Image (tube, rainbow, N blue to C red):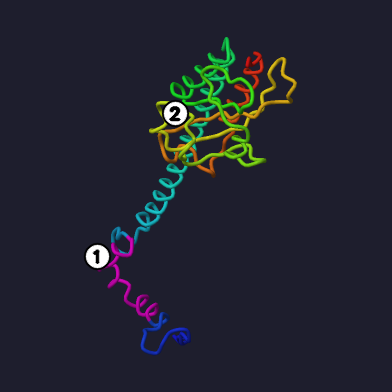
Amino acid sequence: MSVSPDLSSRPEEPHWPEIRAWLQANSQTLLDDRSLLEEIGLKPHGRNVVEFGRAALTKLEEAAEREADARKRIEAVARANFAAQTQTHVAALDLMEARSPSDLARRLDAVAQGRFGLSGAAIALEKPGGVPFGWKSLDAGGVDSLLGEHGLTWLGPNFDGLNLFGGADEEVKSVALIRMAPQFPGSDAPGRHAICAFGSPEEDGFTPNMGCELVAFIARVVERTAERWPILN
């Protein structure tokens, strides 16, 4: 039997064709070395029989565990999204039952704490003009200074000087700010600059790379509900 030299191997290393030929000629030596077979993932099963099941099953089990973990993560995210959407819809109904601007602000804060586990929520309205009891007032240009001239939302860490959450300000670690422009009855202005603010006690409660669809939806509900009542000076 002629054996072709293995040109890819270094001269000092054994050639695989030679090793293969030796194993073929001395197969029983390998079969009798049970510890070596187990180290390479093979299981001896009687004479002249080697079972590959353990190695194959190990790979299958690892793949099954990876798929199960991925499925569990997907299911957990889906359940969390569904729960958040459900709470958002219920919160919208709560807000639409408000009887006055002050009641709207109170309900918003209660919804943020009770349904979403936040530190609080607030409505801030720019001057000049009256600001309802329970709302926060901002100086002219205050919304643009917080969100930028054309910014609609801002999610991220809380910052000094915001002061929108009353007694909960100290525990707020991150915030979501949503621009609003409610058109109040009897006002000649096209809409007053306002913000709907949410505060979280967690530093990663609101982050810049987070989607803001749910809080933006709540802000739109607040905006439309607030347009029911005129704002008195």
Residue situated in front as seen by the camera: 81 or 130: 130
Instruction: Examine the structure image and report whether residue 33 is included in the region drawn in magenta.
Output: yes
Residue situated in front as seen by the camera: 12 or 159: 159
Side (left or right) of 125 relative to 47: right
Q: Main secondary structure of the magenta part?
A: helix
Task: Answer yes or no: is residue 214 visible.
Answer: no
Residue situated in front as seen by the camera: 75 or 206: 206
Residues at marks 1 and 2, CA–CA distance in whole angstroms: 60 Å
Side (left or right) of 177 relative to 47: right
Amino acid found under the numbered disc labelled 1: Ser
Q: Is residue 193 above or below residue 4?
A: above
Q: Is residue 71 above or below residue 40?
A: above
Dot 1 surroundings within 10 Å: few (below 14), some, or many (20 or more)? some
Location of residue 132 (image quadrant): top right
* First-in-chain label (1 vs 2): 1
Location of residue 27 (image quadrant): bottom left
Give me the residue at 52% from left, 31% from top: 81
Q: Position of residue 5 (x, y in %)?
A: 46, 87
Say which element carries label 1.
helix
Specify the quadrant that holds the N terminus: bottom left
The tag on residue 218 is none
Side (left or right) of 171 relative to 110: left
Task: Answer yes or no: is residue 168 visible.
Answer: yes
Amino acid found under the numbered disc labelled 2: Leu
**In this figure, which residue is indicated by the disc labeled 2?**
118
Residue situated in front as seen by the camera: 133 or 108: 133
Specify the quadrant that holds the C terminus: top right
Q: Position of residue 75 (x, y in %)?
A: 48, 35
Give me the residue at 62% from left, 18% from top: 226
